[in-house]
Image: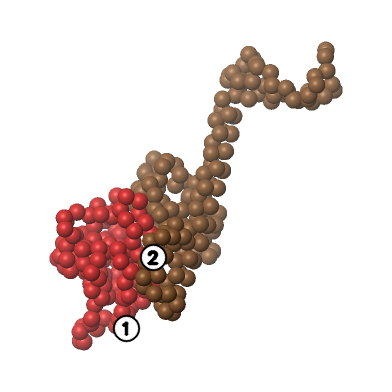
Amino acid sequence: METPETNLLAIPSVEETDGKRPFFQIVFGNQEVTNIIDVNQSIIEKSFRAIEYSRKSEVYLIEATRNFIRKLNFAELNEALEDNEITEDEYNSALDHNSEKFVVTLRDIGCPSDVLIIADLVKKIGYDLREFSTSEVSEMFSVKENQLIAHVDSLRNQLK
Amino acid sequence: MAKFINVGDSIEAKRSDILVRKVSSPTLINIEGVGRFFKYKSKIRAIVKVTEELMPKVHRICCYSNLNLDDELEAGTIEILTENRISLQLVSNFSNVHGIQANNVNAFTYAKIVIPWRFVLEKGLNPHQAN
């Protein structure tokens, strides 16, 4: 038997494993020990879902942070107006020309299951600092409140 | 005209009267496909009343919103969205003995009850669901 140049191999398989045909096997080890991992469709789908969950979580968390900064910016702008540091025209001009710095945009929820990711994130953030209203969650993650409530209701009904 | 006191009840108006005892600093939100609004949140007690109906009389934000002239929300906490920035004069009490000057808002107003009176919560009155 020839010694492979690398200790990592992917070998197409035709054997049945647990009634499911593996897509391929990953073989690794050395001349004394050989490890084989069967990769089937179920593992690929689970891995894909885990990657998608992580990717979307990151997107929502970054959006939440950006919205927090937007609210800080807007609070400072209001304070400046109230303290007469800027005029009403300057205030309006800032809002019109730099709206991205101040405005929290509420968008449609692309996929109904995204509310599960949002619910997970809110749970991880915890309720020790604040009990969030749906409106606050909607502003935090830039989603429309009515859709957030509708999707949560829909998922809850499916679980009944 | 009607008075609404349940959680989730909302009104939309071309012009409105607002009575508040305390209000939070506004945030600025853009509801995609609807428009940009200044969002206020009243605390303790608030009344928001339709003084001029929308023209055309079609809801913009919530399909369950009440749109009739003199429709009124009254509750502990109300979220208020207006198209223009407004300065709200706070009312120290809601006594009817002395007339109270309401804030006349000359802009599109959407208001929704977030926290109703305690007796409403205790009765578990919540006939509405969001669209």
Callout 1: helix, strand or loop? loop
Can you name the residue that lies furthest to the right here? A32
Which chain can be seen in brown? Answer: A
Callout 2: helix, strand or loop? helix
Q: Residues within 10 Å of mark 2 (few under 14, many from 20)?
A: few
Q: Chain of mark 2?
A: A
Residue B130: image x %, image y %? 31, 52
Horizontally, is A56 left or right of B63 in the view? right
Give the quarter of the image for residue B42: bottom left
Q: CA distance from mark 1 to mark 2?
A: 34 Å
Q: Residue at x 51, y 62 (%)?
A: A69
Q: Residue at x 41, y 60 (%)?
A: A97
Horizontally, is A104 left or right of A37 in the view? left
The amino acid type found where label 2 is placed reads Ser
Picture colour scheme: by chain
Circle number at residue A93 = 2
Per the rendering, the colour in which chain B appears is red
Q: Residue at x 63, y 25 (%)?
A: A39
- Report which residue position mark 1 lands on: B92
Count of all numbered marks drawn on residues in the image: 2
Residue A105, relative to residue A82: is it above or below?
A: above
